[in-house]
Structures are given as structure tokens and as C-alpha cells.
Image: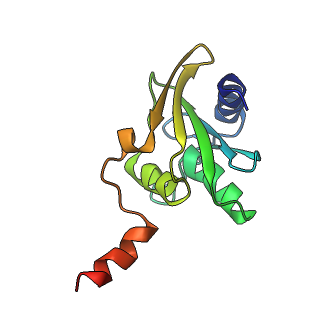
Amino acid sequence: MENKELINLAIDAKNNSSYTPYSKFKVGAALEMEDGSVYTGGNIEIASYSPTNCAERTAIFKAVSEGKREIKKIAITGDAHDTFPCGVCRQVIREFGKNPTIIIANSVDDFKEYTLEDLLPHSFGPEDLDRGTKNV
């Protein structure tokens, strides 16, 4: 899928899927899995904030719940210029993406691409769980 198509889906998710009655700060995400399937999500706020879910995790969890496990690329857009994924979302992207392209989009014509290493250097992933026990 072309980046601009994915960005348009993220913008649509931001505008139509976000539930943000408290902060009014909408974020949308669209991801393409390695098999070409596409999932979108908006951020969902809850009054007590702790159970709030980010747009990126909403989209990823939808994909994972349908058996998809490998993110190819993800587009993220928000109400502020250059809305980046939070730390928790970066870790979730890491869990389900070996080397996904992360697109931070302000519009279909104003976006930048990043690698996971750019946003989460020296990350910890599933393969690191085995490595720890081998050194003991």
C-alpha cells in the first residue's frame, strides 16, 4: 500500500474512530501487516484515564486478535504537529514488528518515515528473554 493511502486511513481513523471527550486530543493510526491486510484505530479515553488506549495499540490489537503478527508499516497522525507514539506503543510496535516503517504524518503531503531503531534504540524484545537465561 502506498504511504499516502495509509496516511488517509489514519486521518479517517483520527476523525471518525477516536473517542476523546476529556482531552479532545484525537490520534489515528493505520497499519499494514506483512500479508497486506490493513487495520485502523483511534485513541479511546476513559474518565479514569488509566484504562485509556492509544490509537496505535487499538489498531495493533485489532490485527493481533485476528491472528496477524507482523507489522510492515504504521502511519500515525494526531491533532498536534508530529504526533509520535508513546513509549508503551513503541514497545507494542516492537513486539509485532521486526523492522516496520513508522510514518509520522501531519497530512498526506507532510510526513516523515522512521525505523523502529530511530524511535526505540536498544529495544528489548521476545528474543531477549532467552538471552538473559543463557548468561546465568
Q: Residue 25: image x %, image y %? A: 51, 33
Q: Residue 113: image x %, image y %? A: 49, 28
Quarter location, residue 131: bottom left
Residue at 70% of width from left, 56% of height from top? 63
Q: Residue 99: image x %, image y %? A: 51, 47
Q: Outermost residue, front direction?
A: 134
Q: Residue 68: image x %, image y %? A: 70, 60
User: Can residue 27 be seen?
Assistant: no
Q: Which is more toward the observer, 79 or 64?
A: 64
User: Can residue 7 be seen?
Assistant: yes
Identify the image quadrant of the N terminus.
Answer: top right
Q: Outermost residue, left direction?
A: 136
Q: Look at the picture and state if 51 lies above or below 2.
A: below
Residue at 61% of width from left, 36% of height from top? 28
Quarter location, residue 27: top right
Q: Look at the picture and state if 126 lies above or below 40.
A: below
Residue 59 lies left or right of residue 22; in this view the side is: right
Identify the image quadrant of the C terminus.
Answer: bottom left
Q: Which is more toward the observer, 5 or 11?
A: 5
Q: Look at the picture and state if 118 lies above or below 123.
A: above
